Image (cartoon, rainbow, N blue to C red):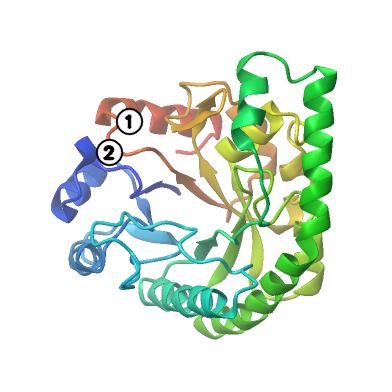
Amino acid sequence: MLALSTSWQPGGSTTAERMFEAFTHLGIKGVELSYQTSENQYQQLKRLLKPSGLKVVSIHNFFPIPPVKSLKKDSKGGGDLFRLSSQEDEERQRAIRYTTKTIEHAAEMDAAAVVLHCGFVEMNHEMQTLYQYFISNQLDSKEAQTFIQNKIKERDSRKPGHMESLLTSLDRLVSVAEKQGVLLGLENRYHYHELPGPDDFEVIFDRFKGAPIGYWHDTGHAHANESLGIIPLGWLLHINTDRLIGIHLHDAIGLDDHIPPGSGEIDFAALKPFLKADTIKVIELKSGIPASEVSEGIRFTREKLSEA
């Protein structure tokens, strides 16, 4: 089954009824509920989705938008509102509390998985400098390579405390997920200092062998890291094949992602050998993309992945 994330909203609409109508017209059988969903929208969607036949396959943490005073009233939510890897206990406890709520909502909606962002290593990441090397075609220069090597070294030197916090958080959450019958999908991230990094998945999965936790692949995030020379082409899927539980499908042009499959540079046919029958497949797009382009992206994805 191919699903579509509610990260895409027709015409930028935030009305649950319009979102529901657009999804049904696209011929989609499954949906992922995005972190951009308010509590009010969630209650509306529940009433619309349950009798519709549309299957909620996954939910993206934090869901719905947490009712926290520090958040702006018009907050669009986010997967990084609180960090499971934070070394500040108050923030980490909030991350655990609201992730637990997301897991419980997933169980309520019979969703198989919750997608997690896990935080980042606190450092001066200088992403704009790295982007500039890419934009000016200077990534292969000695200056750029030295910059990247130094930044990776700095990240790794600062990582242990954040990884320990993340492992402690996940230790709490896997027991919740097991009780609720929900899988936790750890998503590969867009920025090099975010967690888990490419080398961190094995550490986490070894720690939680037999637990309801696995790898969630994001095609656009992987493409960005491959384009920047952080990881080899296709490497993340290769090393995490046995733990893959789900995938966010979207295309990218350079560092610009979350566009419809077939409209960018990613080789979707190359994904097919890694996807199993039970891999959760979700098209995750920017809001406001015309429905006709979304429809073409769905058709293209089904063709490349040979899904009826």
Camera-nearest residue between 56 and 131: 131
Where is residue 56, by image quadrant? bottom left
The one of 265 and 83 positioned closer to us in this rendering: 83
Q: Return the residue at label 2.
A: 26
Spot the residue most to the front: 124
User: Are the residues at dot 2 and dot 1 in contact (C-beta closer than 8 Å)?
Assistant: yes
Please give the label number shown on residue 195. none
Q: Secondary structure at mark 1?
A: helix
Of marks 2 and 1, which one's residue comes earlier in the chain?
2
Q: Label 2 amino acid?
A: Leu
Where is residue 308 shown, x and y percent of the image? 45, 38
Percent coordinates x, y for residue 261 in the rendering: 47, 29
Instruction: Identify the residue at horizontal 43%, vertical 72% (top origin).
Output: 102
Frontmost residue, 152 versus 284: 152
Residue in view at x 24 percent, y 62 percent: 73
Q: Residue 263's x, y, as percent?
A: 46, 21
Please give the residue where the numbered disc 1 appears in the rendered image.
295
Can residue 260 be seen in this snapshot?
yes
Q: Amino acid at mark 1?
A: Ser
